[in-house]
């Protein structure tokens, strides 16, 4: 069971101030309003524990500072009997609550004592476990000492074996000198073979250079021929390009003339249509004239006029 939190006087005063601010009390206040806002139970709940005596002492000290200005208030008239009875009941209820808090504190103190006893038992058990572990460590240390002695004996055997290996190493070094001499002879033979191969390589290289020069000369002749053919093709291409441009210009001119002729035809059609409309209007106006009957020659002239318009 964890121990209750120990609150310092500064923490208690800070908690009381926060309770007063939450209750809307700033500056001086009356005793009832102070008691309604602050109590030992509220402070302990806010702090999560604490000594009730210390909390009560700090509450009384702050109450004197805050309610001190309230001592100049004129005496209050006597309280009516029914209100006094209610106040007595309220006092009894407060006393009951305080007794309940005292019982709770006693039960908490008993819980703390029980927790301390259980912690003491746990510490004793832990010390026994540590003693047992110490004995096991001592046994392990003795076993390690035995292993160390065995390792020392093995080290002596390995030292003797190392001396034998050193002897074998000296013999191997003698054989190594013989192998180095044989290797030097092989190196000489290899250098002679390399010199002969290099001489053959130089002859082949000269022959290859001659053949390469001949092939390069042949390639240059072929390149010159291809260059002349390329120039001829470029000239031919330029001639064809000029011809194409000339044809495109002629085609553009023909299209322009065609568009111009089409515009003139459209204009003539429009004029012909306008004249036809005017003639038709003129003929219609003549048909509505007040003359009883037109002469036969007039009708013939009308047909003659209409025929060219068609």
Image (cartoon, grey):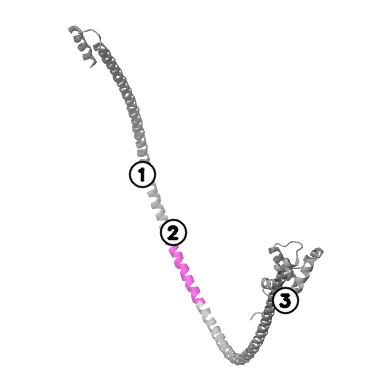
Q: Identify the residue at image location x=42%, y=58%.
A: 203
Q: CA distance from mark 3 to mark 2?
A: 112 Å
User: Is the magenta region chiefly helix, strand or loop?
Assistant: helix
Which residue is identified by label 2?
202
Q: Looking at the image, is mark 3 or mark 1 earlier in the sequence?
A: 3
223 is higher (above) or lower (below) than 242: below
Residue 175, x across and y down, in percent: 51, 81
Query: Is residue 113 visible to us here?
Result: yes
User: Do the residues under discs 3 and 1 have CB atoms within 8 angstroms?
Assistant: no
Q: Which image quadrant is residue 1 in?
A: bottom right
Chain part drawn in magenta: 180-203
Label 1 SS: helix
Q: Looking at the image, is mark 2 or mark 1 earlier in the sequence?
A: 2
Q: Identify the residue at image location x=51%, y=76%.
A: 181
Residue 146, x across and y down, in percent: 60, 93
Which residue is identified by label 1?
222
Which residue is identified by label 3?
52
Q: Nearer the viewer, residue 296 or 266?
A: 296
> Within 10 angstroms of label 1, few (less than 14), some, or many (20 or more) residues?
few
Tell us which disc is closer to us: 3 or 2. Answer: 3
Task: Report the label total.
Answer: 3
Residue 4, x across and y down, in percent: 68, 78
User: Do the residues under discs 3 and 2 have CB atoms within 8 angstroms?
Assistant: no
Q: Which image quadrant is residue 115 in?
A: bottom right
The furthest residue to the front: 81
Tell us which disc is closer to us: 3 or 1. Answer: 3
Q: CA distance from mark 2 to mark 1?
A: 30 Å
The furthest residue to the left: 296
Query: Is residue 38 visible to us here?
Result: no
Q: Identify the residue at image location x=53%, y=82%.
A: 172
Residue 197 within the magenta-colored segment of the rendering = yes
| 143 relative to 236 in the view: left or right | right
């Amino acid at each position: 069971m964890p121990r209750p939190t120990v609150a310092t006087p500064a923490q208690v005063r800070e908690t009381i101030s926060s309770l007063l601010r939450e209750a809307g009390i700033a500056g001086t206040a009356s005793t009832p309003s102070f008691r309604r806002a602050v109590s030992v139970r509220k402070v302990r709940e806010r702090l999560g524990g604490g000594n009730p005596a210390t909390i009560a002492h700090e509450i009384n000290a702050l109450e004197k500072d805050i309610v001190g200005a309230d001592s100049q208030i004129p005496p209050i008239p006597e309280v009516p009997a029914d209100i006094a009875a209610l106040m007595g009941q309220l006092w009894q209820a407060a006393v009951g609550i305080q007794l309940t808090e005292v019982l709770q504190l006693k039960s908490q103190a008993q819980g703390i004592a029980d927790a301390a006893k259980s912690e003491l038992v746990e510490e004793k058990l832990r010390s026994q476990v540590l003693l047992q572990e110490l004995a096991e460590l001592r046994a392990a240390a003795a076993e390690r000492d035995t292993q160390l002695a065995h390792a020392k004996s093995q080290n002596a055997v390995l030292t003797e074996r190392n001396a034998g290996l050193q002897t074998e190493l000296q013999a191997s070094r003698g054989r190594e000198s013989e192998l180095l001499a044989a290797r030097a002879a092989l190196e000489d033979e290899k250098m002679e073979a390399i010199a002969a191969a290099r001489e053959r390589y130089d002859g082949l290289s000269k022959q290859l250079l001659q053949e390469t020069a001949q092939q390069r000369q042949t390639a240059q002749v072929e390149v010159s021929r291809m260059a002349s053919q390329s120039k001829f093709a470029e000239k031919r291409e330029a001639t064809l390009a000029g011809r194409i441009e000339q044809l495109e210009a002629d085609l553009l001119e023909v299209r322009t003339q065609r568009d111009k002729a089409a515009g003139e035809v459209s204009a003539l059609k429009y004029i012909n249509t306008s004249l036809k409309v005017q003639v038709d209007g003129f003929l219609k106006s003549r048909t509505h004239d007040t003359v009883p009957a037109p002469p036969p020659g007039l009708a013939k002239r009308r047909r003659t006029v209409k025929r060219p318009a068609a």
